Image (spheres, rainbow, N blue to C red):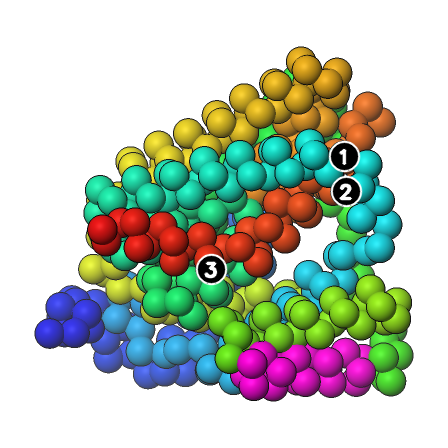
Amino acid sequence: MTDQQQIGGGALLDTAPKPLQWLALAGLSLLFGWLLEIARLPAAALVGPMLAGIAIGVNGGAIRAPKAAFDASQAVIGVLIAMSISPEIFLSFAADWQLFALVVVATVAASSFLGWLISRWKVLPGTTGVWGASPGASTVMVLMAEAFGADARLVAFMQYLRVIMVSVAAASVAGLWLDTSKAAAPSVAWFPSIDPADFLATLGVALAGGLFGRVLRLPSPHFFGTFLLAAALHLAFSASFQLPPWLVTASYVVIGWWIGLNFTRSILRHATRALPQIVASILALMAFCGGLAWILSAALGIDPLTAYLATSPGGMDTVAIIAVASQSVDISFVMALQLARFLVVLFAGPSIARLVARSVKE
């Protein structure tokens, strides 16, 4: 019996025409995204549409985001992440590489252990707990989890719940040291002027990267292939890419819809039953990273807020906004450590998940 059959005739959208379902999805996406923006919660453009997709999916909706649009959105996110890597960031790595290595390895080890416990205790099926507990790179982990056979819906549930909890905690802790009312996100020019040649070149890199990833049979080929190609061009030739905010936001919306519309009532019930264990694992990881921040501050004399923001397990965009609001925070240290963990999770995530999965089965 399928999930749609299990839902039965009581679902609100069982007989609703698809145009009406798309209209409802768009309206709910705007509403949820707007509410998340007002609350200054991170990734509103992704989490809002994902919540809207869940609302439609669990009520019998039959619409799905087109696969081609999902692949294109992954490629856009690959270019976006590649643009965040600058040659200068490696100078910060070189100056404190032992410290970065210690904190990153400890954080990844702790999150992997928590994921192992979730899988071992069968709180969530298969390697879902491993991907969901990964400390950072939320969107990327969801994309790669699906490529490796985990349940992307439950991984997304864990990842974005952690992002929200970590971001709220970071803002609260920062309030002890500084006035976070100054930490408002800058206004966005949604339709900036675009150089046609650069924009077409960016789209060409996204297309070539997806083909590159498929030829090499990479996991999440459209994301990984594009990321590797764009990063190589960016670092080696100082290539710049044009990604207007409307395109990035549209990509987040499509990814959110792709995840959310695949939720069903049975999946949501499973996630709700596992909520106490998931919240406990997130709190444990946050406490562990807080302990690392205390060690950095006490042993090396690093500013407490700098240490806390640098070790915060996720919510990089919110961390950056809060860090900018205070002159006492070493922004380069915070972002270098955040990026170091992101890259380790990005490239080591599949191997760690496979290793933990084998240990769970033994």
Identify which residue is drawn at 34% across, 40% down.
278
Vertical relation: 101 (above or below) 160:
above
Give the Cα separation between the discs numbered 1 and 2: 5 Å
The amino acid type of the residue labelled 2 equals Phe
Q: Which residue in the structure is indicated by mark 2? A: 93
Badge 1 or badge 3: first in the primary sequence? 1
Q: State whether residue 134 appears in this view.
A: yes
Q: Which residues are magenta?
A: 199-216
Q: CA distance from mark 1 to mark 3?
A: 26 Å
Question: Residue 91, relative to residue 99: is it above or below?
Answer: below
Q: Label 2: state its secondary structure.
A: helix
User: Callout 1, which amino acid?
Assistant: Asp
Q: Are marks 1 and 2 in contact (CB under 8 Å)?
A: yes
Instruction: Decide: is 336 above or below 233.
Output: above
Judged left or right of residue 118, residue 288 is right
Is the magenta region chiefly helix, strand or loop?
helix
The part of the image, by quadrant, that contains residue 111 is top left
264 up-or-down from 336: above or below: below
Residue position for label 3: 350
Residue denoted by label 1? 96
Q: Secondary structure at mark 3?
A: helix
User: Looking at the picture, how far across and down is residue 105, in whole percent?
Assistant: 56, 39
Question: Residue at (64%, 38%) from the top-left corner?
Answer: 101
